[in-house]
């Protein structure tokens, strides 16, 4: 049922990567519980603009949970306190009248702040690039079922492929480890025959890039899986470890 | 060298040394409960594991296992703190799935290490070390049962050892399954099973150790 609530927002403001940031407090009245969290942020920004103040910078794009652009650490959780959704899918009905909401950017040495709540997640793109190409036979469309793939493998690969690269895993991890993301990207290909050709090289190159960019060492806390909006399982991390270790032992 | 340069390589070392230490604990705890069943039998084991060449080799390998585990723990923990960045979250909460132990392995390890030093002083220093150096009372160097009953005649030491073993238990409930995960020996079906197995292993090991101070605390060991 729709109703309106008043909230207090404590938002991280930071002018640039090397400036010192601090929290600013904003009061926002009459927020519809039917509005999304980002719509609430839009309303606040409209107000700041009308007051001739600088609006708050935050990332977003599709606003339907598929692109991985939105971020925000809301009340101690990446993508907010509600489970298995992205920030753009979070609604104001999850908050109470009079509540204080703390909004911070992803914090990790590998994700430097660009401005306010916006961070540079280019590190993830660099890891994907390091993964390299996938060999495919071009030509006519192959016959259906000419490459048999077990249903369990196909499902597992699809689960891994649901990762949207948002970075919540590394943001939530006490070690700032990107293992869940890298594991998902390695698994989605390693499980399929098409991805097997470069599998060993891919695992080594992506892990090397991840380490080079300053992400931490995974200690299997499971915070990544618990906060991942797509519920990517840490069993993919075990697969990544397996792929990486067997590739190294073969060398 | 990828065992130092890569995060998964470092985790490999961490998990192998961890599993090695767990296997040692399993042996050590099995050996220890003999002191309850038969103090004479226990002393025979102590005699056998005195300052002989084979016991010395085993002790050196064990010490190396500890040193490597601890050095890597320091190395990993330092890197992880740096990766977290300079500015911390003002508000950070954990989902209930995140085990407390998994976030505090270094603290638990440090507690374990502190008591380990005390433990070496309590036993090793009075037994194998005496045999090696020739200083001290050599006649009691293989009398493990004597030193056990001596130490645990004080209830304070019983409690200290129980606290120590509790910290070790917490370290192991996360450590054992984490080591298997680091080695890649895990998947979706096995994840809950691996966790259960590691809880069982760590609980059995710790209960075997703990039975001794509890036995003395309850007054059964006073006759020896
Ligand atoms: C009897 C003693 C010990 C045993 C049996 C033991 C066992 C283990 C095991 C099995 C792991 C899991 C490895 C993995 O996650 O891959 C582990 C992790 C760890 N241990 Fe120990 N440990 C012992 C003592 C210590 C000590 C003295 C310290 C140091 C201060 C320490 C610090 C750590 C840390 C920080 C981790 C987490 C590392 C990570 O998960 O990346 N441990 N330990
Ligand atoms: S694994 Fe989950 S939390 Fe990590 S980047 Fe992918 S979708 Fe985001
Ligand atoms: S804006 Fe695209 S996932 Fe949230």
Image (cartoon, grey):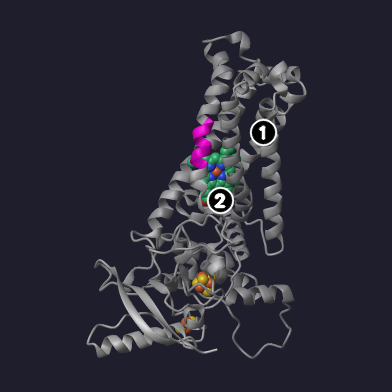
Q: The C terminus of chain B is located in which quarter?
A: top right
Farthest residue in the right direction? B37
Residue B67 badge: none
* CA neighbours of label 2 inside 10 A, class few (<14), some (14 to 19), many (20+): some
Pinpoint residue B93: horizontal percent, then vertical percent. Answer: 48, 63
Magenta-colored stretch includes residue A219: no
**For marks 2 and 1 on the same chain, the one whose residue lies earlier in the sequence:** 2
Q: Decide if residue B56 is on the left or right side of residue A20.
A: right
Q: Nearer the viewer, residue A147 or B134?
A: B134
Farthest residue in the left direction? A52
Q: Could you say whether the residue bearing mark 1 is in a helix, strand or loop?
A: helix
The residue that appears at 55% across and 14% down in the rendered structure is B130
The residue that appears at 58% across and 67% down in the rendered structure is A199
Locate residue A188: give its quadrant: bottom right
* Circle count: 2
Magenta-colored stretch includes residue B110: yes
- Residue identified by numbered label 2: B101
Marks 2 and 1 share the same chain: yes
Q: Decide if residue A79 is on the left or right side of residue B194.
A: left
Pinpoint residue A45: horizontal percent, then vertical percent. Answer: 32, 85
Q: Which residues are magenta?
A: B109-116
Q: Decide if residue B123 is on the left or right side of residue A173.
A: right
Q: Is mark 1 within 8 Å of ligand 1?
A: no
Q: Main secondary structure of the magenta part?
A: helix
Q: Nearer the viewer, residue A5 or A87?
A: A5
Q: Decide if residue B128 is on the left or right side of residue A101.
A: right
Is residue A67 among the parts visible in the rendering?
no
* CA neighbours of label 1 inside 10 A, class few (<14), some (14 to 19), many (20+): many
Q: Chain of mark 2?
A: B
Q: Could you say whether the residue bearing mark 2 is in a helix, strand or loop?
A: helix
Residue B209 badge: 1
């Amino acid at each position: 049922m729709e109703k309106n609530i008043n909230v207090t927002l404590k938002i991280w403001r930071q002018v640039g990567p090397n400036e010192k940031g601090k929290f600013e407090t904003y009061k926002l009245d009459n927020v519809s519980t039917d509005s999304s969290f980002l719509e609430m942020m839009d309303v606040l920004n409209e107000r700041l603009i009308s007051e001739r103040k600088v609006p708050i910078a935050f990332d977003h794009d599709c606003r339907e949970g598929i692109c991985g652009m939105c971020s925000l650490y809301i009340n101690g959780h990446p993508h907010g306190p509600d489970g298995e959704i992205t920030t753009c899918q979070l609604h104001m009905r999850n908050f109470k009248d009079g509540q204080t909401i703390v909004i911070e950017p992803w914090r990790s040495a590998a994700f430097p702040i660009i401005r306010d709540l916006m961070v540079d997640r280019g590190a993830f793109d660099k890891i994907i690039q390091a993964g390299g190409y996938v060999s495919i036979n071009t030509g006519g469309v192959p016959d259906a079922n000419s490459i048999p793939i077990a249903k369990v493998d196909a499902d597992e690969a699809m689960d891994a492929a649901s990762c949207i690269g948002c970075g919540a895993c590394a943001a939530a991890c006490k070690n700032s480890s990107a293992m869940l993301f890298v594991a998902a990207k390695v698994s989605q290909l390693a499980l399929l025959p098409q991805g097997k050709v470069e599998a060993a090289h891919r695992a080594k190159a992506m892990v090397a890039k991840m380490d080079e960019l300053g992400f931490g060492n995974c200690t299997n806390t499971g915070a990544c899986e618990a906060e991942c909006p797509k519920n990517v399982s840490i069993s993919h991390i075990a697969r990544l470890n397996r792929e990486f270790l067997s590739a190294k032992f073969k060398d | 060298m990828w065992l130092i340069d890569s995060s998964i390589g470092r985790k490999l070392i961490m998990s192998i040394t961890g599993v090695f230490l767990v296997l040692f604990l399993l042996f050590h705890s099995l050996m220890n409960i003999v002191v309850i069943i038969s103090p004479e039998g226990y002393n025979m084991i102590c005699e056998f594991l005195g300052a002989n060449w084979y016991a010395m080799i085993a002790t050196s390998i064990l010490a190396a296992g500890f040193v490597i585990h601890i050095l890597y723990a320091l190395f990993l923990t330092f890197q992880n703190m740096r990766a977290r960045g300079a500015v911390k979250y003002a508000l950070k909460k954990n989902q209930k799935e995140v085990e407390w132990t998994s976030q505090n392995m270094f603290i638990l390890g440090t507690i374990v290490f502190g008591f380990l030093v005390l433990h070496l002083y309590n036993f090793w220093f009075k037994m194998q070390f005496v045999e090696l150096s020739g200083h001290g009372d050599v006649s009691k160097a293989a009398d493990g049962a004597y030193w056990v009953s001596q130490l645990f005649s004080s209830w304070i030491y019983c409690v200290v050892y129980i606290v120590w073993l509790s910290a070790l238990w917490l370290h192991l409930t996360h450590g054992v399954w984490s080591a298997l995960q680091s080695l890649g020996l895990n998947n979706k079906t096995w994840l809950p099973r691996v966790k259960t197995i590691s809880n069982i292993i760590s609980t059995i090991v710790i209960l075997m150790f703990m039975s001794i101070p509890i036995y003395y605390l309850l007054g059964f060991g006073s006759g020896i």
